[in-house]
Image: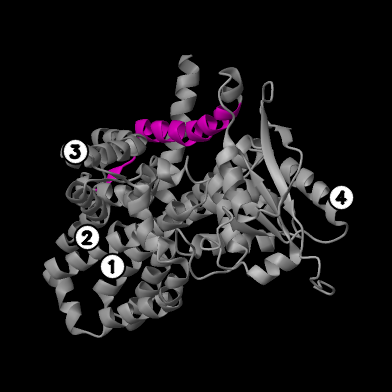
Amino acid sequence: MAVEGIQAASRLGRLAAWIENAPSQALATFLALHVALWALIPALLQPNLPLDVVEQLAWGREWQWAYFKHPPLPAWTVEIVALLTHGWDRALFFVGPLASALALYLIWRLATDIVGQRLALVAVLVQEGVLYFTFFTPEFNHNVIQVPLWALIGWTARRSLIFGRIRDWIILGLAAGLGMLGKYSTGLLLLALALFVLAEPGARRCLKTPGPWLALAAMLLLLAPHIVVLGTVHYGPLDFPFERGTWAAHWPDHIVFPLQFAGAQVLNLLPALLLLGVLLTSGQPDAKEVPRISAFDRHLAALLCFGPFLISVAASAFLGLRFKDMWGAPFWDYVGLFAVVCLGREAPRPSERFLGLWAAIFLLGPIAYAAQFPGQALLDAKPLRGQFPGAELAAAVEAGWHRSQGGRPLRYVAGDVWYAGNIAFALWPERPSVLIDGDRSKSPWVNESDLACHGLVLVWQGAGERDALLSRFPEAQQQRDIQLSYRTWNSQPSVRLGWAIVPPTATCDVAGS
């Protein structure tokens, strides 16, 4: 045992030397391993795509500038990957890990500008302890896409404020526009930066230059098509956070809700906080490399790290609105940066104890993710969405449609986006459009005359969904229920789904369509 301990210490010592002597090379290796672990393990063990990815695919197929819940950038991103890989679903597990790796790289660039490459790498290592960068990335969605976009905004904002170059301001404006096209909560970061500019004397001078106004113009120009079409989805993205959150029923909720949200963020930061504790108690100053950090950079790092979070907590308390925990995903892009800029002793060197804990966190995260699949079987728990038989459902529906309609292609599927979206994507390249919940207001891309011309399939689970769909399509011909087994590691519990065929209008000429 003593020999093994000495060998482990020796390996950690070599790792520490590598980080100190070749930080950029170490970063590239770390990011490659990060993507490999967090993409390959879900791709190998999770039979079905996650819910949010299926939803993005249903939206992205239609290339809309706005959807009924959110702005479009995540849906476009997933759609591009699907098109480039010809509908290979395993490729979509790489999108989230690649997004978080891009964020880590951008954070490294920002930190390098302030403290140099070696300490910037320490900041990135700390970020690996933020669960939003790891465990939640395989389910790519509007929260995950904000992680790299917020990192880009922070990096370009500092460059704009420090150098004042027009090109940096325009890039910042475009980054802000992309952030808003990812999710509106990017506005929290932009508000925090605006307050920083007003409060910081060194930053306030930029208001007398054309830079900030060009950035604002670039952002609005990028957002203009989205703003123009919001009315077609009844301004749903503006209402979504208020509809999804929980409103206070009693006055104590104005205190409890923000505390609950803050507590959830602490839990998602816990591994990073452990890393920080070890770094600050065991790291040794390096007399050869003591970065000189300005008050401007200290204030900016604190603002980036805590500004959006504090604004959201204050808004939760004022409104009495309980935010979803995952909405905090991009808030913590700058925990590592704040640590090395504001909390660390002069140029703390990562100790072997720090690197040992980091290696354990780095490896245990993917192991924990993988364990949920056999764990579900051992505990005989409810099947996970990732074990849903989406491809089998699509095959059963497609076979039934073609038995009924001959060679006519299936162009539309209506129902809950989880079931309808699974069917639509699995039928690549035919790939029907999804009429979400059978509701045209949620699917403005569906043309009524085209729907009548081609017909569609309805799919549901439960009497409530069935009745809603059949009331919308009373001419539907109900089919025998489809019963399929989840792709689990145990006795494979089954799922029963109802479905129906709405035949095309008899007089509709679809020749050549």
State which tag comes first along the sequence, 3 or 1. 1
In this figure, which residue is indicated by the disc labeled 2? 300
Cα separation, mark 3 vs mark 1, equals 42 Å
Q: In the image, 166: left or right of 301?
A: right
Cα separation, mark 2 vs mark 4, equals 64 Å
Looking at the image, is mark 2 or mark 4 nearer the viewer? 4
x then y, percent, for residue 119: 33, 50
Magenta stretch: includes residue 512 = no
User: Helix, strand or loop at disc 3?
Assistant: loop
Examine the rendered structure and indicate whether residue 505 appears above or below residue 363: below
Magenta range is 347-373
| Residue 333 visible within the image | no
In this figure, which residue is indicated by the disc labeled 3? 250
In this figure, which residue is indicated by the disc labeled 1? 158
Camera-side residue of 52 and 232? 232
State which tag comes first along the sequence, 2 or 4. 2
Residue kind at label 1, given as amino acid type: Arg
Cα separation, mark 3 vs mark 4, equals 56 Å
Give residue 403's mark: 4
Whether residues under marks 2 and 1 lie with C-beta atoms below 8 angstroms apart, the answer is yes
Report the colour scheme.
one colour
Q: Which residue shows up at 69% across the image and 70% down it? A: 450
x then y, percent, for residue 176: 36, 69
Q: How many marks?
A: 4
Q: Which residue shows up at 59% across the image and 38% down it? A: 463
